[in-house]
Image (cartoon, grey):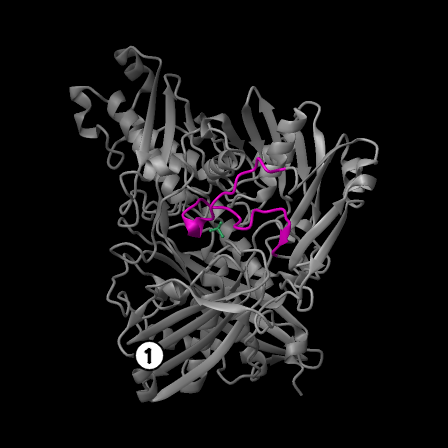
Amino acid sequence: MSKAAPDPQSNMGKPEPRLDGRLKVTGEARYGSDFAVSNPAYAFLVTSPIAKGRIESMDLRAAKAVPGVLEIFNYENTGELKDIKYAKGGGGPTSSIQGFGPLIQYGGQIVAMVVADTFEAAREAAHMVRVNYTSEPPSATFDSRGVSESAANEGLPQAGDAEQAYVAADVRLEAQYETPTQHHNSIELFTTTCVWHDNQLTIYEPSQFVYGLKANAAKKMGVDIADVRAISPFVGGAFGSKAQFSPRTGLVALAAKRLNRPVKLVTTRDQGFTIQTYRAETRHRIRIGAERDGKITSFIHEGWEVTSRPDPYSVSGVEDSARLYGFGTVKTGVTLVHADRNTPGFMRSPPVVPYIYALESAVDELAAKLDMDPVQLRRINDSSVDAMGKQWSSRSLMKCYDQAAERFGWANRSAQPGSMRDGDWLIGWGCASAVYPTHVGAAAVRIRLVANGTANVQIAAHDLGTGAYTVIGQMAAESLGIPLASVTVELGDSELPPAPVAGGSNTTASACSAVMKACEAIRAKLMRSPADDTTVGSAAGADRNKLNLEDRFKTLGVGAIEEYAEYLPPGAKPDSMKNLYAGTPFLGGGSKGEKLMYATGAEFVEVRVHASTREIRVPRVVGAFAAGRLMNTRTARSQYMGAMIWGISSALHEAAEIDPRTARYVNDNLADYLIPVNADIRDIDVILVPEEDPLVNPVGVKGIGELGNVGTAAAVANAVYHATGVRVRKLPIRLEKLLTT
Ligand code: MOS
């Protein structure tokens, strides 16, 4: 891989090493459960083995007799905990099912928490809690008896008469696709530590949204929001799973209060499958009508998604699939299938991973039907305006294809499936598009520039391992004209000015827009002299090297300048900042605004399928991505690499298997939940395609955290088809699905 030399002509940021790299490799970085609290008690959860029914009684005698046990919390003695509203019901970002009983709504629901002097005593006692349930047969998933259906969101994309255009088309393709349940399985487990001091609650918990955590914990406990603080400076993987408030936090907070002692909970890997959200399984029926020359005249995408009984969580990725190409007509719909399951939630690229997999598989099938190169088919349907009439703010999809195809050597592909071979290995080449909505949210920041040329940035954004500390620091350094080494960055603490939930890949765009604004205000104060008028408040065009800080501070007669700034994106309401402080973020962009704002990419994959055993290997992947300005080419490359590795995982390995009789996950551990290991991953080649988009936000950043794993699964599936002639329409593609003859 070539070292990214910054091109002065482009808006590619410097490949600065991570500001927090040393802390991480030396083990000094403090994650949620690492914070030392004095004399903690330890908690262990008890979860329900049944998925549907009621708790009739609990026998706690044996558990309470375990030496060191302090208290056992369950629905009978936690009445102080308030019901809080779910996001779709007008509340905040939470797990929607908050109760601990007696009603059991899904397998693995929390029914009790044991607190003891030691972790071992708590765990032992947890296994001795006897719960008598009456259970009913649960409905596990699609096609289970007893599921009910409801229509998802209103207002999904529609344009023209797609049914009629489909019937009238020269060439028609109809196909159905399925994606499995997935769980985030972050290496850092779900943990919560709660400490009370004089009616002030401090929560240490890995979080993608400390303001949401703080607000929901306050509501849950029925205390003033000002009396709660949430701290999460480092997160060991999240991917969406740490964005929503979980009922466990209320239990731990209550336990710490009642025992008048800090309480620490570290949940187990298998509990992590049910006490937090997950990506639900989806189904798709796609119909595409096209002219002989490949122009698509009709696109019909129907989706089905599993959710819980009470809540209408939906990812509705037709919002994005309907806009990826210039379709003549569009019809979309999404149906929710309510089962006896926990409510699903965000997981990396929530809407687009399943829906674009389906679309990009179908496009490849259409190309085969038309006997046309799949890149050419996409070029024919490339359009900067969607069927509903909305313009893209910028679109570099075909630039990504051109660069990735060239690097990959796509021109040497022989189109016929099964026609490329190396000894016993069938070679397949496939490609697919990636697309991700550009989100930007309301954010606030406080920056202090000191006369000695150092600066401190405070914002309650989150670094999930993505590099947020570094890129936020880079934006401040650049805007103030000081070296990055002179900037310190504080994140992940609800005492700092608020940033949105670290979701939807918005952090860099939102936080850096606020940082830029605060820095401009500092510069304006600093440069307040007639001689400097040409550079006042202007980052662009200012010759930052001429800024002699010490002189300026002397002239002004102050030792430091501190600025607080709020950034509100277009579409924000007057109370969006107030709501953010109260734990409800505002996110705009994507398909919601005047223009369509999306980042794009093209992913090319080579697979090798063994002719007799059908073992599947992925020796190389090339991904080219365009996402506006990149703050840091090193962290960007890492994001894309990690995402494509996850894409390979989705294509070939991952699925949480649910037992249809019990509605319980059977592979809820890292031995049975398959993910790729080093031996599964070979060359991952990332191309950073320059793109400028001044419309998306003041910093021109589109966000990259989720883009990279959107196209990979379809590209692998398309490559497997090219290698074998077998079209697998249900992920993951494991070798048994290729043993057809
Ligand atoms: Mo990310 S799945 O948008 O938290």
Tell which of 247 and 518 is nearer to you: 247
Q: Helix, strand, or loop for circle 1? A: strand
Image: 364 above or below 521:
below
Relative horizontal placement of residue 379, taking residue 471 as reference (left or right): left
Q: Is residue 255 visible to the viewer in this orientation of the structure?
A: yes
Relative horizontal placement of residue 17, taking residue 441 as reference (left or right): right
Relative horizontal placement of residue 243, taking residue 515 as reference (left or right): right
Q: Which quarter of the figure is the C terminus placed in?
A: bottom right
Tell which of 403 and 272 is nearer to you: 272
Tell which of 534 and 472 is nearer to you: 472
Q: Which residue is mark 1?
A: 298
Task: Determine the image quadrant of residue 556.
Answer: top left
Q: Is residue 193 visible to the viewer in this orientation of the structure?
A: no
Task: Determine the image quadrant of residue 607.
Answer: bottom right
Callout 1, which amino acid? Ser
Which residue lies at the image location 66% right of the left edge and 69% below the top edge? 660
Image: 51 above or below 86:
below
Residue 156: x and y in percent read: 34, 65
Label 1 CA crowd tier, 10 Å (few <14, some 14–19, many 20+): many
Residue furthest to the left:
530
Q: Residue 162 magenta-drawn?
A: no
Marker count (numbered): 1
Residue 308: x and y in percent read: 54, 59
Task: Determine the image quadrant of residue 168.
Answer: bottom left
- Magenta residues span 78-105
Residue 418: x and y in percent read: 57, 84
**Is the shortest distance between ligand 1 and the CB of mark 1 under 8 Å?**
no
Q: Residue 101 magenta-drawn?
A: yes
Dominant secondary structure of the residues highlighted in magenta in the image: loop
Residue 577: x and y in percent read: 33, 36
